[in-house]
Amino acid sequence: MVVSESNQVVAPPIQRGGFFSNLATGLKSLLKGMGITFHYFSRPSTVVTQQYPENRATLKMFDRYRMRLSLPHDENGFHKCTACTICEQACPNSSIRIVSRKGAVTNKTELDRFIWRMDSCTFCNACVVACPFSCLKMSGDFECSVYDKSLLVFNLTRYAGPTSTVLMKVTDPQERAKMWEPRDVYSGPVPLRGTAVPGGGRTLGAPEPVKASAPVAAPTPAPATAPAASATALAVEEEGGKK
Ligand code: SF4
Ligand code: SF4
């Protein structure tokens, strides 16, 4: 920084070399670039960039690559989320909204919808680290482009209900089926598909209390097993993710 006599900040003068000096600098820079090119040409295993998109079917991203937040469901279709909202509070830009409800059978707080805004997520992984039950993970799914930005707001849970631990304690499938309701990726009592998420953008440091959910729909006919209806949701989810 250069300060003039009139106390104004002025740009420093550009240092211009002579013809041969500039030629030498250019040649040195060119050789340096060619050296890097030759290094990767002779050692292909060290190349970190990936060929794309012709190989999209076989392309596997690195383990540390982070793209889509997911709430994994086990082989029975159940998750471990308790709707504690810790991940929501850990998110620095309000990209997560936990909607909970009082369980009709358990009378305890349980997850209704897990709303994730991919359009504002920075993939910082803070929510994954903050979850005390290791419910969340970042997947390496790299093809998430869509033409409609509203499709970047997802519901990550396939059902409203208690955790897998609670559900699997109930041995009677008919009784268990009364404890959950199917949810899909883009619809529900809270506005999804890009409209404002209730509570999104709340002031940090002033977490809201866990809200009871919107009125629970009338019980659906009890399926005999774990969320079979989630197959449709899954299909929609997969479709949404691939757009
Ligand atoms: S990865 Fe970061 S920005 Fe994205 S939802 Fe999690 S905490 Fe929020
Ligand atoms: S994902 Fe984990 S931190 Fe977030 S609400 Fe569920 S249990 Fe709590």
Image: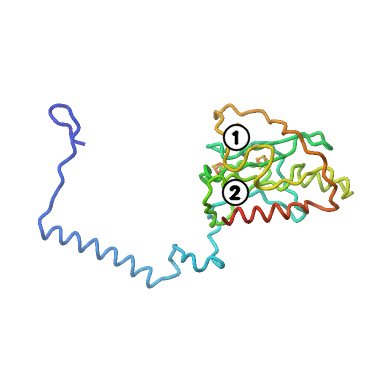
Q: Which residue is pictured at 66% across the width and 53% down the height?
A: 236
| Image: 227 above or below 4 | below
Q: Tell me the element at label 2.
A: strand
Asked which colour scheme the image uses, the reply is: rainbow
Q: Position of residue 105 (x, y in %)?
A: 84, 37
Q: Tell me the element at label 1.
A: helix
Quarter of the N terminus within the rendering: top left
Q: Position of residue 240 (x, y in %)?
A: 61, 53
> Pointer 1: what residue?
89
Q: Is residue 46 rendered to the left or right of residue 82?
A: left
Viewer-side label of 2, 1: 2
Q: Which residue is pictured at 20% across the width and 60% down the height?
A: 26
Q: Position of residue 66 (x, y in %)?
A: 54, 52
The three-letter amino acid code for the residue at tag 1 is Gln
Q: Is residue 34 rendered to the left or right of residue 6?
A: right
| Image: 83 above or below 227 | above
> Pointer 2: what residue?
69
Q: Which mark is residue 236?
A: none
Tag count in the figure? 2
Q: Position of residue 89 (x, y in %)?
A: 60, 35
Q: Is residue 60 rendered to the left or right of residue 16?
A: right
The three-letter amino acid code for the residue at tag 2 is Leu
Whether disc 2's CB lies below 8 Å from ligand 1 is answered: yes
| Image: 175 above or below 200 | below
Q: Nearer the viewer, residue 202 or 91?
A: 202
Circle 2 crowding by C-alpha within 10 Å: few under 14, some 14–19, many from 20: many
Quarter of the C terminus within the rendering: bottom right
